[in-house]
Amino acid sequence: MRHFKHTLVCAITALMVAPLFGQDVVTLSIRDVIERQALLFPADGDTGVLLAHQSGKDAQSWAGFAQRLQDEGYASIALESISTEDVMSGVEHLRQAGKTRIALIGGSIGGGGIQSAVSKGVPSEVVLVVLLGTASGNMAEANSIEKLFVITQNDFFSAQTYSSYDKAADPKDLVVYPGKAHGQEMFDEPYGPQLVDLILRALAN
């Protein structure tokens, strides 16, 4: 009995200190001068996903979605800073990790950083952009990248999203859900699982 209790305590302790979603802290280099941290959720597949959060959130806010990506075999890197340069550095990190297909997913202002990076030119490995209630941007020249815009009917950011969608080159799609949830908040709505499935289908194409 004493041995059983000791084993049980060790097992519980191990669970408490183990990373909840199999995540690692990595360091991104900006112009070989600035170093910023990001969260890497590793997986062995050839597809990597970059995650840029909305205002008021952080890299950890993507953890639940990143775990689902891991379950499907997709690695992801969640940025702490969501500037254009951070997006580009995150993409390069995924490339160096051997990812030959890369998707960029951003919520609100994080989507603005992604669009800015795309407009400046991203590697050919970037094949998909998913924007959730995005800030303004211009992907008029990105005709080799699939683009998915997602918004709710009463999102206070709707004008920016529609403007970005109108400017973006084909191929592109726009999906509108009911309500007023903004950006990543859509994952918490009743249609959240449907949204996740929509993104997974886009990743699988």
Image: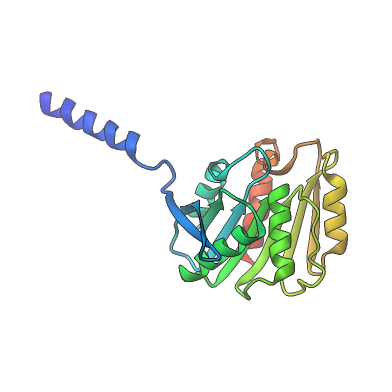
Question: On the picture, is 2 further left or further right than 45?
Answer: left
Task: Please give left or right for residue 3 compared with residue 15 in the image.
Answer: left
Using the image, determine if residue 72 lies above or below residue 15. Answer: below
Instruction: Kindly indicate the quadrant of the structure image that contains residue 179.
Output: top right
The front one of 68 and 155 is 155
Q: Decide which of 101, 54 is in the foreground and name it.
A: 54
Q: From the viewer's perspective, is residue 176 above or below residue 140?
A: above
At x 68% / y 51%, what residue is drawn?
Answer: 110
| Residue 181 percent location from the top left of the image | 75, 37
Q: Report the residue at 68% width, 41% height from top.
A: 55
Q: Quadrant of the C terminus?
A: bottom right
Q: State which quarter of the image contains the N terminus.
A: top left
- Numbered disc total: 0
Asked if 204 appears above or below 13 in the picture, the reply is below
Q: Is residue 89 above or below residue 80?
A: below
What is the residue that sits farthest to the front in this orientation?
Answer: 33
Residue at figure coordinates x 80%, y 36% from the top left: 180
Give percent across and percent down for residue 100: 54, 73
As drawn, which residue projects farthest toward the top? 1
Q: Position of residue 22 (x, y in %)?
A: 41, 48
